[in-house]
Image (cartoon, grey):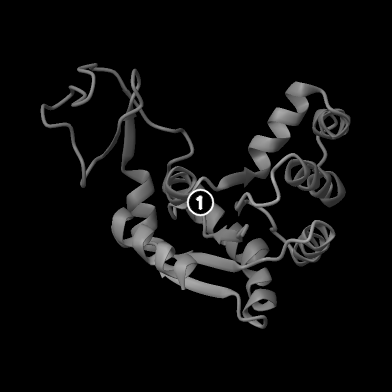
C-alpha cells in the first residue's frame, strides 16, 4: 500500500540525504517542488509555461501552480507508489491543498517527520563543508578532512570548492525563514497525531534507522 510522508527540517538538516536513502531502499519517489518546477519549465508543459512567466517577471510561483505540479506528478505514478514530499507544504494554505490533492487520488498523509537540529551546531556543520570540484566528494573543515591534505580521497583531484551561501549569516537567515514559514504547519499535523520528531544532529545511519522505525511502526 502506498505511503505518503512529509520530510521537514531547516536547510542543512539532512532531508536530502535521508530522502535519497528512502528512495534507494523502498523505491519511494521524492517530490521536490524546486526540481519539479525546473523540470516543468524545461519540458514547457502548460504549468511549466505558467511558472516560467511568473519567474521571469520576478514573482513568486503561486500555490495553485505548485499544487498543480504535485497533482500532475501523482497522476503519473502508479497508485501503489510511496511518496516523500520535500519542500511542500510550506504554509497552512498548502497543507490544506495537499489534503485535497491526496483525497482526490484516494491517498492520505501517513507521517510528518521533522528532523530537529541545534542551530549553532547546524551553522558549524554547514559553514565548514566543502567538496571536490571534480567528483563532488564531500568534506568538512573539522569532521572530515582529506587523508592527504589538498588531495581528494576519492579521485585524487587537488581542486575543491565551497558554496557561496554556506556562510553563517545566510544559514541563520534560512533557519529564521524556516521557523517563520514552515514550522507553523506543524501544529496542524500535530493535532492529527501525524508528527514524529527525529534528532537530525545524530549520525546519518542513526537518523535513517529512526525514520525506518517510524515507517514500519
Q: Who is closer to the viewer here, 178 or 37?
A: 37
- Counting every numbered tag in the picture gives 1
Compared with 80, 51 (above or below) is above
The reply to whether residue 117 is visible in this rendering is no
Q: Quadrant of residue 107?
A: bottom right
Left or right relative to 97: residue 22:
left
The image position of residue 193, as x and y in percent, is 61, 81
The image position of residue 213, as x and y in percent, is 40, 68
Compared with 171, 69 (above or below) is above
- Say which residue appears at 24% left-offset and 16% top-offset: 157
- Say which residue appears at 66% left-offset and 39% top-offset: 34
The reply to whether residue 111 is visible in this rendering is yes
Q: Quadrant of residue 41?
A: top right
Q: Who is closer to the viewer here, 73 or 131?
A: 73
Q: Who is closer to the viewer here, 162 or 46?
A: 46
The image position of residue 85, as x and y in percent, is 63, 53
Residue that numbered label 1 is attached to = 11
The image position of residue 195, as x and y in percent, is 56, 74
Q: Who is closer to the viewer here, 2 or 209?
A: 2
Q: Residues within 10 Å of mark 1 (few under 14, many from 20)?
A: some
Compared with 53, 182 (above or below) is below
- Say which residue appears at 23% left-offset and 19% top-offset: 155
Amino acid at each position: 500500500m502506498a505511503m505518503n510522508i512529509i520530510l521537514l527540517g531547516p536547510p542543512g538538516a539532512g532531508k536530502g540525504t535521508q530522502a535519497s536513502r528512502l528512495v534507494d531502499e523502498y523505491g519511494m519517489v521524492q517530490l521536490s517542488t524546486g526540481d519539479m518546477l525546473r523540470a516543468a519549465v524545461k519540458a514547457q508543459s502548460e504549468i511549466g509555461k505558467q511558472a516560467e512567466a511568473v519567474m521571469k517577471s520576478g514573482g513568486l510561483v503561486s500555490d495553485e501552480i505548485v499544487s498543480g505540479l504535485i497533482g500532475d506528478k501523482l497522476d503519473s505514478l502508479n497508485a501503489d507508489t510511496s511518496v516523500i514530499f520535500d519542500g511542500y507544504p510550506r504554509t497552512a494554505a498548502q497543507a490544506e491543498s495537499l489534503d485535497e490533492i491526496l483525497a482526490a487520488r484516494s491517498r492520505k498523509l501517513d507521517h510528518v517527520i521533522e528532523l530537529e537540529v541545534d542551530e549553532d551546531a547546524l551553522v558549524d556543520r554547514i559553514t565548514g563543508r566543502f567538496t571536490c570540484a571534480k567528483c563532488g566528494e564531500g568534506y568538512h573543515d573539522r569532521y572530515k578532512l582529506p587523508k592527504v591534505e589538498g588531495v581528494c580521497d576519492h579521485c585524487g583531484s587537488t581542486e575543491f570548492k565551497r558554496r557561496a551561501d554556506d556562510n553563517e549569516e545566510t544559514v541563520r537567515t534560512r533557519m529564521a525563514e524556516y521557523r517563520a514559514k514552515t514550522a507553523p504547519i506543524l501544529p496542524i499535523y500535530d493535532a492529527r497525531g501525524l508528527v514524529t520528531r527525529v534528532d537530525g544532529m545524530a549520525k546519518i545511519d542513526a537518523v535513517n534507522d529512526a525514520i525506518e522505525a517510524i515507517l514500519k511502526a
